[in-house]
Each structure stands twice: as structure tokens, then as C-alpha cells.
Image (cartoon, grey):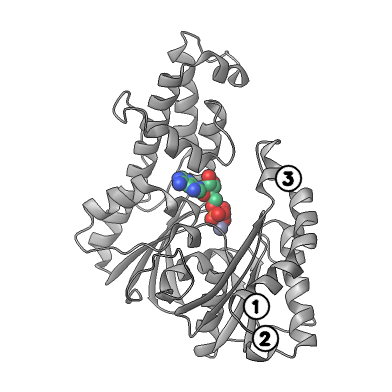
Amino acid sequence: MKILGIESSCDETAAGIVEDGRILLANVVASSMELHAQYGGVVPEIAARSHIEAIIPTIQAALTQANCTWGDIDGIAVTYGAGLGGSLLIGTMTARTLAITKNKPLYAVNHVEGHVYANFLTETSLPGYTLPQKQPGFPLLALIVSGGHSQLVLFRDHFDYTLLGQTRDDAIGEAFDKVAKIIGLPYPGGPSVSKKALEGSPYAFTLPKAKLDDTYAFSFSGLKTAVLRLAQAQIGQDFTFPSTKLPERLSEAQKADIAAVFQRVAVETVVDKTILAYEEFRPKSVVIAGGVAANEDLRRQLAERLPISIAYTDIKLCTDNGAMMATLGCFKALHNQPIADPYSLGISPNLSM
Ligand code: KG4
Ligand code: ZN
């Protein structure tokens, strides 16, 4: 069973090919990130235009990398939500057209669920990938941390899950991106904040953790504001000082300490709740998923505090990619999940778990 996965929900145009929900055959990602960097964030119109240019060459490159022809492909999985409307439209229209012209079953897949399935890839002959040795078992607790989501989800089995809690405001990746802006680090903020944090002291200051009545809910907007106030205080100014002028006034050492303290507190927040969920539900395995799962501090803190061992997938499979969507597509096919109608499949920009 070989499935082609197509992903275009944000600024990455991606295609991957996966066999039996386990073997990674191809993973090709074309990113329009440099085009957005000058604006400090993803510009939806530019992302959609870039997808139009990149999508066919990306799919072709995936087929070549997997050494496959269309005859070898058993089905197509495509992200239909959540994401940017214009971006999702390019991926779904392409997948629908290919499903009709190549006569393949079409699987509509949820982007956030796809991130979790990156953890099911255990084999590949592609160079440069470090994968877990075995697939996670059920019940499975997933911590989903990306630019758009912060969620804890308990999977009893494939396609049988409960959302335990999610963020009430900003996602954790969004907080990394906003903090990067405050201290003048380049977009995308997650990798630049974690790189800068290596030079700083994670205990240089204290920052507040949100206290919520709902055990598994998250909130990151207060932390982001606390970072802004901390940066203003560091240069001897009050809350009226414009945030856009902070980067030129902060020293490199101050930026590094702010990055390190923010990262520690943001990561501790999600790790604390993951440990609470582990203790309540005693899952067989715990996985992390989404762009922030690439964060080394998160990986270290979780491995230290969880009573069971945790395996992490390759960092290239944490940020948006087509292989994770192909993996989810394989499991849909293997578990006889409904097939989408290629003549009518729509997009769902606000799709949730
Ligand atoms: O999953 P993803 O590629 O796209 C969404 O579905 O949102 O996640 C992107 C997010 C961005 O906010 C980015 O700053 C963050 O993941 N990110 C990181 C790291 N690498 C990417 N955050 C913290 N540390 C990292 N190393
Ligand atoms: Zn994503």
C-alpha cells in the first residue's frame, strides 16, 4: 500500500510517499519561507501563489525520489484543513484533479492529526533521517505543538480520540514567533529563539505561568506580554516604550537571557500538563508533534520527566511535510475509512481535532 500525501496548508508545498503507514519512501518540501521573511510572517496571498508554482514539480520530485510511477501509487491523501484558505485550495484542487485523471482513491486528511502520524514512520532508505525503532502503541498521548495549535489529545486507537485540552489564545509556536519579533530575531521565530537561548541563562529572570481552572487548557498570550514588559524593563523603560524599537536597544546578552527564560517557561508549561495527563491516563506511549516538536529543550525536558521512554521522530518530519499526511492516508486506507469525492471535496480552514 503506497500513498502519496500532499500538504499545502501554510507556506510549505510538500509531497511525500509512504508504504504501509511505516516506510518513508519520499519527502519533498518546497518552502516559500524566504519570500515571507521580509514581512516577518506568512503572507497568505504570496503563499498561495507559491503553491501554484511549486506543487506539480514537488509531486514529481517525490515520485522520482521514491522511484515510483503513478502505477505504483494506491491512493492520494491531501490536507483539507486546518490552514490558510488559499493555500489549502491549491493542494486540494491538485489532489482532486490527480485522483480523477490517475483514477486513485482520495483521502481527505486533517493537518493536525497528520502531525501525530509523523511518529509512525519507522523505516527508510532515504539518507539523513533518524526514525524511532517501533511505532507508538495505544492508548497514545499526543502533545501537539505548532504555529497554530497547542493541544493534548488521547488516542484510544486509530481514529478514536479525545481532545483533552487546547490553547485559549496563542499557540506555543506563535508565542515563539512573537517573542522573536520583540527581541529582533529573524523569522521563523522558533528556531531563532532556541538558537539564541543557547547563549543565555534560563534562570536569569522569572516569568509567570498561566494558571487556568481547566487542567489541560493552555494560554500563551500572558507569557508573550510578560516578555514584552521584561524587555522594556531591561532597558529601563515602561510599558509605553514601542516594541519595534526594543531590538536596537537590547544587548545581545539581554536578548539571549530573554530567549532562554522564555523558552524554559514555555516548554515547562506544556511539559507540566503532559506529565499530568500521563499520570491521569497512563497511556502506553507519548508522542510530540508539530513544528515546536523540533525544539531540543522540549525533547530534553520531556525525556527527563516522563516515567516511560519517549522516541522522537526526525526534525524534518516535525515541521509541515507531505510524508506525515501520506502516513495518515495509509492508515485511513488500511482501516477502511471513508474515501473523499474528488468532484466535490471542499476545504475546511478552521478544522479542529
Ligand atoms: O507545524 P508547523 O511547521 O506549522 C504549523 O502547522 O503551524 O509549525 C511551525 C511553528 C512555528 O511557530 C515555528 O516557529 C515553530 O513551529 N518551530 C519551533 C522550532 N522549529 C519550528 N519552535 C521552537 N523551537 C524550534 N526548534
Ligand atoms: Zn503544521
- Residue found at the far top of this picture: 236
Labels 2 and 1: the sequence-earlier one? 1
Q: Callout 1: helix, strand or loop?
A: helix
Determine which quarter of the picture holds residue 75. bottom right
Q: Nearer the viewer, residue 215 or 75?
A: 75
Q: Amino acid at mark 3?
A: Val
Looking at the picture, does residue 284 appear above or below residue 302? Answer: below
Q: Callout 3: helix, strand or loop?
A: loop
Q: Residue at x 53, y 33 (%)?
A: 180
**Residue 219 appears in the picture as rendered:** yes
Say few, some or many: other residues with alpha carbon within 10 Å of mark 2 (under 14 / 14 to 19 / 20 or more): few
Residue that numbered label 1 is attached to: 63
Say few, some or many: other residues with alpha carbon within 10 Å of mark 1 (under 14 / 14 to 19 / 20 or more): many
Residue that numbered label 3 is attached to: 43
Say few, some or many: other residues with alpha carbon within 10 Å of mark 3 (under 14 / 14 to 19 / 20 or more): some
Q: Is residue 44 left or right of residue 146?
A: right
Determine which quarter of the picture holds residue 160. bottom left
